[in-house]
Amino acid sequence: MHKEYFVGQGKKDGQVLRVKEQRKDRWKAYVHDTISGIAELDYTAMEEMAQHLDQLTKPPGSLGRLEKIAVQLAGITGSIKLQKQRKAVVVMAGDHGVCAEGVSAYPQEVTAQMVLNILDGGAAVNVLARQAGASVYCVDVGVKTEVKHERLLSCNVRRGTRNMAREAAMTLEEAYEAISVGIRIVDHLYQQGYRVLATGEMGIGNTTPSAAILSVLGGLPVIEVVGRGTGIDEEKLRHKAAVIERAIEVNQPDRQDAADVLAKVGGLEIAGLVGVILGAASRRCPVVIDGFISSAAALAAARMAPQSVSYMIASHLSEERGHQKMLDCIGLTPVLHVNMRLGEGTGAALLFPIIDSAAAIVNEMATFDGAGISR
């Protein structure tokens, strides 16, 4: 049996990604093959970069995170000759059956409407990506209603998750299939020359599964990690926490198995972003992590493939409660603190110019010897 993934429907992106399903665990095997291909960083290049940075006309370490990013990029690319690379934000979109429990301030149909807004270039992520000279690719991995647009990357695994407060959000096979979508999208973009990727998402209600993932994988009480999402009031916040607690009780996700957690209390777009992260790491590309939902995907990816963390850069600290705990669980430190909580990949897009600045410092700043300056 063949299964087709249509990447776009117009002339520009009209490419078909075709795969063969030869056995039931096809998707799981594909994901684990990708994980096995994630290499360690090049520590020799990192040491050379650190030494080079100390030769530049500045006090050692005085450029802070710029220097750490430069060292990380050297480890990822295996070179101290950093180049300004082609960049893209991958926005995974999906709907959530748990919205039936009244956990969001917005109706579910807003997901599809916002997907069209992103595809038309009118969303905040589009504006910030344009400022950074980056592209935005929007992927339908689980939107409930059919969306048609010539720029859409159409890879729908199922029309929204099931209501996790009553049953598993997905089957394990669907979760692995959604992860595989993310990996294949990375392969598609890599072939087009993109070398820096960022995670973005769109899905009404998706802070609910994100908080559930953090609670389970982080071993934290739900009340400590659940937040207001799109702006719910105190009463709805308590209700949202109760819904998450019920979902965890009903499904009993195995905290030692991130894929099981994704399937039972996760989301299709979150699983898709896990694939983006794993795929980027396997291609030796840095992947910029956005806010709370993207970090839930990063946490799951970190548990599935600890070596993938070396390829992640945390863009910012979200205003969503629990985000700092999420980053602590992964072992990431955010670069920016700008009080954002929009999602879409907006915070990640803001980090692109900083990555370019790190490369420019390495390539253009004079050394003490070259400038004839005494140490």
Image (cartoon, helix red, strand yellow):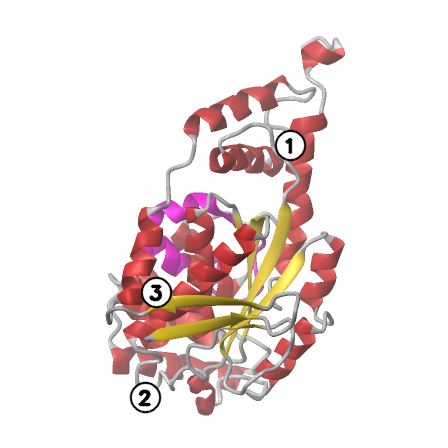
Can residue 300 be seen in this snapshot? yes
Q: Nearer the viewer, residue 246 or 204?
A: 204
Under mark 3, the amino acid is Leu
The residue positioned 52% from the left and 58% from the top of the image is: 188
Q: Check disc 1: other Cα within 10 Å, few if <14, some if 14-19, many if 20+.
A: few
For the residues labelled 3 and 2, the Cα–Cα distance comes to 21 Å
Under mark 1, the amino acid is Leu
* Residue 88 percent coordinates (x, y): 61, 55
Whether label 2 touches label 1, CB < 8 Å: no
Whether label 3 touches label 2, CB < 8 Å: no
Q: Nearer the viewer, residue 300 or 213?
A: 300
Q: Is residue 287 left or right of residue 130?
A: left
For the residues labelled 1 and 3, the Cα–Cα distance comes to 35 Å
Q: Which mark is residue 63?
A: 1
* Residue 241 percent coordinates (x, y): 41, 79
Q: Earlier in the sequence, mark 2 or mark 1?
A: 1
Mark 3, residue position = 220
* Residue 314 percent coordinates (x, y): 53, 51
Under mark 2, the amino acid is Arg
* Residue 369 percent coordinates (x, y): 69, 10
Above or below, 249 against 81 in this view is: below
Q: In the picture, which quadrant includes the C terminus?
A: top right
**Secondary-structure class at tag 3:** loop
From the viewer's perspective, is the residue at label 2 or at label 1 nearer? Answer: 2
For the residues labelled 2 and 1, the Cα–Cα distance comes to 51 Å
Mark 2, residue position = 166
Q: Which mark is residue 118?
A: none
Q: Is residue 132 left or right of residue 243?
A: right
Q: Earlier in the sequence, mark 3 or mark 2?
A: 2
Above or below, 292 against 70 in this view is: below
Q: Nearer the viewer, residue 210 or 344?
A: 344
- Please give the range of residues in magenta: 299-324
